Image: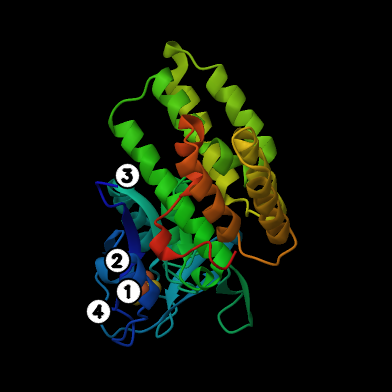
Amino acid sequence: MEVKPKIAISSCLVGQEVRFDGGHKHFRYATESLATYFDFVPLCPEVAIGLGIPRPTIRLIKGENDTTEAVSNADRTIRYTEALSAYGRKTAPALHEVSGYILKKDSPSCGMARVKVYQNNDGPPDRTGVGIYANEIMSAHPNLPIEEEGRLNDTRLRENFLERVFLYHRWLQLMEGGVDSNALVKFHTVQKFAILAHDEPAYRELGRIVAGVSTSDIEARCMDYISLLMRAMKVLTTPKKHANVLMHIMGFFKESLAAEDKAELLRLIDAHREGLVPVIVPITLVNYFRKRHPSAYIDGQTYLEPHPPELMLRNML
Ligand code: SF4
């Protein structure tokens, strides 16, 4: 891939000492494993709105009319809600080039979900909040893959997030070059098995969107397409879904494979379905067979290599 995808990230996660206590929350997986494949765009909303380092902490509280307010813990009459929202609204348009965002969990500014919200100033909190800045970014970019660093320690969520980031990057590149109906059909064709591995109903609906596209409604169709595609790709894959896709792919080889090769591939697909081997095992065999029996349709499928193999994202699935 010529242009590295850009990922926006909470500054404290790349080791910048911007937290309230002058520290950081270095997320080493990002800087040590992902940095080879992505350019990071670090952003700290609290520093950007002029808060110092160190500074009093912020908490979310329930405001009037069920609103959520960000207040200073040192002086609860000091509110940062509008400043953080305004910074989010100002930053959002500049993020049209990023393909993903990694946010700091639990932060009243950056947290994407389950942030503590205090019902009154001293009552017990519940975990229903969204960081004020993060909320603006997520509203402005509903299709952008966004995750918190904590969730990225889960191998399934990590693989899912990075698959979506690479996919969204390809979409941004497609949009940059100007899209016509042929380009959209081509884009969709190579994603087919990848989509099928996530969400079969969406796979069928996306096919209908692409089939009905015409020059006059290309923009509206693209919006429908990418919004459904990104929602579909958020649905997690399972061994059963992978086995289904791999059986489809095997159908393309079945005439050219020797009986024992076919039997071995079937055995590995079944072993994955039963949870005995990770999905990378049958996929490796498929990749070997497709080199011996090239098929333009199969070779182009992003399903077979949705992210760099060196990241080893499928080794634990
Ligand atoms: S969580 Fe967000 S606001 Fe807090 S230090 Fe990190 S980047 Fe800054």
**Observer-nearest residue: 29 or 297?**
297
Say above or below: 142 vs 217: below
Q: Amino acid at mark 1?
A: Glu
Indicate the secondary structure of the residue bearing disc 2.
Answer: loop
For disc 4, does the CB lie below 8 Å from ligand 1? no
State the separation of the CA atoms marked 2 and 3.
Answer: 20 Å
Q: Amino acid at mark 3?
A: His
User: From where the camera sits, is residue 69 visible?
Assistant: yes
Q: Nearer the viewer, mark 2 or mark 3?
A: 2
Q: Is residue 201 left or right of residue 150?
A: right
Who's the residue at 53% across and 57% down the image? 160
**Observer-nearest residue: 265 or 159?**
265
Say above or below: 313 vs 167: below
Q: Nearer the viewer, mark 4 or mark 1?
A: 1
Q: Amino acid at mark 4?
A: Gly
Disc 4, disc 1: CB below 8 Å?
Answer: no
Task: Return the residue at label 2.
Answer: 35
Task: Return the residue at label 1.
Answer: 32
Q: Position of residue 245 (x, y in %)?
A: 64, 43
Disc 4, disc 3: CB below 8 Å?
Answer: no
Indicate the secondary structure of the residue bearing disc 4.
Answer: loop
Task: Return the residue at label 3.
Answer: 96
Q: Position of residue 55 (x, y in %)?
A: 31, 83
Indicate the secondary structure of the residue bearing disc 3.
Answer: helix
Q: Earlier in the sequence, mark 1 or mark 3?
A: 1
Who's the residue at 43% across and 45% down the image? 167
Indicate the secondary structure of the residue bearing disc 1.
Answer: helix
State the separation of the CA atoms marked 4 and 1.
Answer: 28 Å
